[in-house]
Image (cartoon, coloured by chain):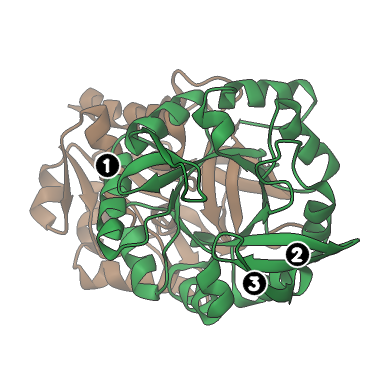
Chain colours: A green, B brown
Amino acid sequence: MLAKRIIPCLDVRDGKVVKGVNFEGIKEVGDPVECAYEYNLQGADEIVFYDITASHEGRGVMLDVVRNAAKKVFVPLTVGGGIKTVEDIRETLRAGADKVSVNSQAVQNPQLIKDGADIFGCQCICVGVDAKKVADNKWTVYINGGRIDMHIDLIDWVKKCEQLGAGEICLNSIDTDGVRGGFDLPMLKAVCSAVKIPVIASGGAGKLGDFAEAFLETDCSAALAASLFHFKELTVQQVKEDCRSKGIIVR
Amino acid sequence: MVAIVDYGAGNIFSVKNALDYLGYENKLTDKKEDLEKAQAIILPGVGAFPWAMNMLKLSGLVDTIKEQAQIKPFLGICLGMQLLFEKGYEFEECSGLGLIPGYVDKIIEPDLVIPHMGWNKLVYNHDCPLFNGLTDNEYVYFVHSYKAFCDDENLYAYCEYGGRVPALVSDGKYIYGAQFHPEKSGKTGLKILENFVKLAEEVR
């Protein structure tokens, strides 16, 4: 049996960890390599670097972050944000990432999922999906950090991602993101029953019990959080102990 | 020095990073002399069996590997572990290095996700120096769609994923193969790598 994974996510801009993704009021909270190392010590099962830099120069800085993190963090590393082409995927993997996460670019160019999976293997292609509820049990897919509604049905999209060769889906609920009231369980359940590939729950973790709740109530394989871990409100270790005490298999 | 075989098919940098972090002298190499001089050899590998085997042949190292693996600690990782067996059936039948009896074929588990990807628990089957210092509750990181089919005597640890998935195999002498990625398995993986390199010190 595979252990359920706890994944801290680091938002990185110009080589620094920042918080406040909506671009206003961004504050720097540290060095990404140091933060990743700390999460590694806490028992993180994987670490996600999410590049919110828009510029081309920023990509080079991000690759340096990955290169340096790979020298002292020995768990899988995922890089998301700004990956547009097969060449971007290649560069990111060569820098030491184990997986890439593609989001808006995959919606606009689904072939990127297929090409990436064919060349590098489906295990390194994670598709990040931002979605928002439109009616009961119905959600649509958004791009550009939740700003643009693509009017694509979420369930149709995740099935298509799976067909194209995605290795996993990182499902972020715009409705619960930042609310800190727990993961979006109805959305997670719907996606987990639509695809066989692993689903990572994202958006909404606000307290210790939220992680175990997602694992007990849905078939998700992993749960991701950023600010909760950034601001040291919880450690990965505490989350795992809570899960373990509720009978969930964690590393 | 630990030689990391660089034959164009691998996650060689993460293996190198892990050995650097542990403070062991190592060298990425495709040279026969380096394998002969090394105290231990690591064969990494990512990709498809026939393609990697072909890359290894093109590197001209097959005979050296077969010979050196009999006289010094040798560790195959992931596809590098699969290449240790006699045959692989990924896309087509293909001969492997034949250092451990058995073959490699697709994992068939209709109810489970393939690739087998993530952290899974090691179940020990025989004692092995690579397990020194590990507890009964160790998880390691796997990413693969094919698995080894081998005799119980060569199966040192496995994990449960539907059926048994061989995790660590050995010929009982110098040759080891890890289906998981020790270089991505946190402190458990680093401990296994450290145990492996220490074998080389004992041999000397």
Label pair 1/2, CB-CB below 8 angstroms: no
At x 29% / y 54%, what residue is drawn? A63
Per the image, the residue denoted by label 2 is A195
| Earlier-in-chain disc, 1 versus 2 | 1
User: Where is residue B193 shown, x and y percent of the image?
Assistant: 35, 33
Per the image, the residue denoted by label 3 is A161
Q: Which label is found at residue B123?
A: none
* Towards the viewer: B152 or A145: A145
Residue furthest to the front in view is A24
Task: Give the chain of mark 1.
Answer: A
Disc 2 is placed on an element classified as: loop
Q: Which amino acid does label 1 sit on?
A: Asn
Quarter assignment of residue B192 = top left
Per the image, the residue denoted by label 1 is A68
Task: Give the chain of mark 2.
Answer: A
The number of callouts visible is 3
Same subunit, tags 3 and 2: yes
At x 20% / y 62%, what residue is drawn? B61
User: Where is residue A168 shown, x and y percent of the image?
Assistant: 62, 59
**Left or right position of B68 against B179:** left
Q: Which amino acid does label 3 sit on?
A: Cys
Label pair 3/2, CB-CB below 8 angstroms: yes
What crowding class fits label 3: few (fewer than 14 Cα within 10 Å), some (14-19), or many (20 or more)?
many
